[in-house]
């Protein structure tokens, strides 16, 4: 029995082998003799592949039936909160599906302008060219300036923070601490947190020094500051944990109260933007976010609500 | 016969589509990146080190220099180690050792780069910060991690090159009274040199193209590094760091960075092919 199978498989192998060399020969001939035919085939293929790519991209945000799905895209700072809100909302509205995607503030605003997303999420203010969109502030987020636990410093003036990040103050010795170079940690260009920090601290012209280390998430900035006694960085207030120390800015510590009353200076708004807000599930979802329930959900996650 | 033709077409189809995807990628990168280079000027793009894309400055000189520094560092650490390893495995170790050691070394290539990066951050970076100074995230950290990551490439290609040297050469040399080491150094290594250079170049390509581990350990600062303890941002790190938020010109600038990287790696691969062929 076994032998028989082996013989059969060997026969198959031989046949396969013969056809293989045959195909090679044939393929070579095709390659050399009818180059132009190959080219047509290749062009057709390229077209097909391109189409596939487009299809995949456009499918990402496809609406299944008008009104059933709400697509939110944008800031990765807003994303976790939007997901939380969507989850709760879908619980009470089982017929509606909400897709939350990242991509960054600029991408979200662009998607909302193009209509690719029903709502764009942004952690930065709109620029003049983007003002044609409807903007709905949903929460405030404080940006905390953080240092290592071992750092005895508790307070910095806003101007001092600017000088540090600008590269004018480079040594902890300037603050009556044991002299050691300051390790500045910033976020990558284009990040919503960095954008807000630049707007709030650096002003129009000052640039963050090129010496600064660049990390690509709030988490890794926090990780490095928790590890390096000479580091200074900034992260979203909701993400401060006991391993790092949030500094007071101009004598005001970042707390819910100080953010709400705007006595703490480094506060940014989280926005949802849309081309227009028609009555329907989209409007309903926005109402939910601004309702007491939605706002308390955001507060529970470390943000500060916009409504009183 | 019909079936043969059918299979034939399918195979041709598959072969062409793989080439096609390469073509599409190439065209796409250039399509997206060239407008930015035309906009800022090639000289400004390549030779300025002022990178502030949201303010309209697109100079990648610092990143080119950093990429070269980190890669050279990786070669300085990885090549002697890898080559020594290859010589031991190919020339001096008994078969039993070889059968254990070679697959183990190749396993190094199977470890995901994010794991290397993670190890670097947790382990190497604090060591550098505490004992050598600086922020720890540095050219040195990147080089050490990359040096380890290129080992499998360097070792396996070097072993192949050494094995390709005919035993006749070795026997001849030994017969002339040379010791084993003299034989390896004066006869086998020169004979295998083109293969070893190929190994180094391919290792270099791997080091330049590596992204995740470097982002995690090199610090990504925009300044041109002046010492090995300074942080640095490589070309790949620049793309991966900023692509999430980039739009408009900024996005084009990242694609343009991709073009530069693409050209560097093409040059490396071509020279590796040419050196191998010359033999």
Image (cartoon, grey):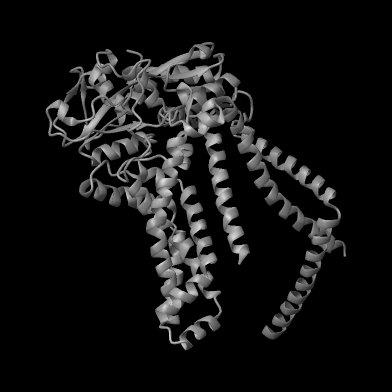
Q: Residue furthest right?
A: B1
Q: Which residue is rendered at x = 56% and y = 28% of the image?
A: B41
In this rendering, is residue B44 above or below B233? above
In the image, taking residue A17 as reference, residue A273 lies left or right, namely: left
Q: Residue at x 61, y 38 (%)?
A: B29
**Relative to residue A76, is residue A257 depicted above or below?**
above
Q: Which quadrant of the rendered structure holds the C terminus of chain B? A: bottom right
- The picture quadrant where one finds residue A116 is top right
Q: Is residue A192 above or below residue B216?
A: above
User: x, y (%) of residue A306?
Assistant: 36, 15
Q: Quadrant of the N terminus of chain B?
A: bottom right
Side of B10 where A215 appears, left or right = left
The residue most toward the front is: B176
Return the x and y of residue A101 as percentages of the image width and height. Answer: 50, 32
Which image quadrant for residue A51? top right
Query: Which of B102/B93 is in front?
Result: B93
Tell me if residue B247 can be seen. no
Q: Looking at this view, is A229 or A223 the one in front?
A: A229
**B157 sits to left or right of B21:** left
Q: Give the residue at x 50% y 18%.
A: A273
**Image location (x, y in percent) of residue B164:** 56, 74
Toward the viewer: A252 or B172? Answer: B172
Which residue is more in the foreground, B207 or B4?
Answer: B207
Residue at position x 30%, y 44% in the image:
B229
């Amino acid at each position: 029995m076994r032998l028989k199978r082996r013989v059969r498989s060997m026969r198959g192998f031989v046949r396969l082998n013969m056809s293989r060399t045959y195909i090679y020969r044939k393929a070579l001939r095709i390659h050399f003799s009818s180059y132009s035919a190959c080219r047509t085939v290749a062009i057709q293929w390229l077209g097909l592949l391109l189409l596939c790519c487009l299809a995949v991209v456009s499918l990402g945000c496809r609406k299944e039936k008008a009104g059933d799905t709400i697509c939110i895209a944008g800031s990765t700072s807003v994303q976790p909160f939007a997901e939380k809100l969507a989850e709760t909302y879908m619980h009470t509205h089982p017929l509606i599906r909400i897709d939350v995607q990242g991509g960054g503030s600029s991408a979200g605003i662009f998607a909302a302008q193009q209509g690719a997303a029903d709502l764009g999420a942004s952690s930065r203010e709109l620029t003049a060219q983007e003002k044609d969109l409807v903007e709905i502030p949903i929460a405030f987020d404080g940006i905390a300036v953080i240092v290592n636990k071992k750092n005895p410093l508790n307070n910095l003036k806003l101007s001092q923070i600017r000088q540090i990040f600008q590269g004018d103050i480079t040594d902890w010795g300037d603050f009556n601490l044991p002299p050691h170079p300051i390790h500045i940690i910033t976020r990558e260009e284009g990040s919503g947190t960095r954008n807000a920090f630049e707007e709030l601290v650096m002003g129009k012209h000052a640039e963050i020094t090129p010496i600064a280390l660049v990390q690509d998430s709030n988490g890794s900035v926090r990780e490095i500051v928790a590890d390096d006694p000479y580091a200074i960085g900034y992260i979203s207030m909701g993400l401060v944990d006991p391993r790092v120390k949030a500094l007071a800015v101009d004598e005001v510590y970042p707390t819910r109260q100080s953010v709400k009353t705007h006595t703490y200076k480094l506060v940014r708004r989280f926005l949802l933007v849309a081309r227009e807000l028609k009555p329907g599930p989209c409007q309903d979802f926005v109402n939910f976010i601004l309702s007491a329930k939605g706002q308390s959900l955001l507060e529970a996650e470390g943000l500060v609500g916009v409504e009183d | 016969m019909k079936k043969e033709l059918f299979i034939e077409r399918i195979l041709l189809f598959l072969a062409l589509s793989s080439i096609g995807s390469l073509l599409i990628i190439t065209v796409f990168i250039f399509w997206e990146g060239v407008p930015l280079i035309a906009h800022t000027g090639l000289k400004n793009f390549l030779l300025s080190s002022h990178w502030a894309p949201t303010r309209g400055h697109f100079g990648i000189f610092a990143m080119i220099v950093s990429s070269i520094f980190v890669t050279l560092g990786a070669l300085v650490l990885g090549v002697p180690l890898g080559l020594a390893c290859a010589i031991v495995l190919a020339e001096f170790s008994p078969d039993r050792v070889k059968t254990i050691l070679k697959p183990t070394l190749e396993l190094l290539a199977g470890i995901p780069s994010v794991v290397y990066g993670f190890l670097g951050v947790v382990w190497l970076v604090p060591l550098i910060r505490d004992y050598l100074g600086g922020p720890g995230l540095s050219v040195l950290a990147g080089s050490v991690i990359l040096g380890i990551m290129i080992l499998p490439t360097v070792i396996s290609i070097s072993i192949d090159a050494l094995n390709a040297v005919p035993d006749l050469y070795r026997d001849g040399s030994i017969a002339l009274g040379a010791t084993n080491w003299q034989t390896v150094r004066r006869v086998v290594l020169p004979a295998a040199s083109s293969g070893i250079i190929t190994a180094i170049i391919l290792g270099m390509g791997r080091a330049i193209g590596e992204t995740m581990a470097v982002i995690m350990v090199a610090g990504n600062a925009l300044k041109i590094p002046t010492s090995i303890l300074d942080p640095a941002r490589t070309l790949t790190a620049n793309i991966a760091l900023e692509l999430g938020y980039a739009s408009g010109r900024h996005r084009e600038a990242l694609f343009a960075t991709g073009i530069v990287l693409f050209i560097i790696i093409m040059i490396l691969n071509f020279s590796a092919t040419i050196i191998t062929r010359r033999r």
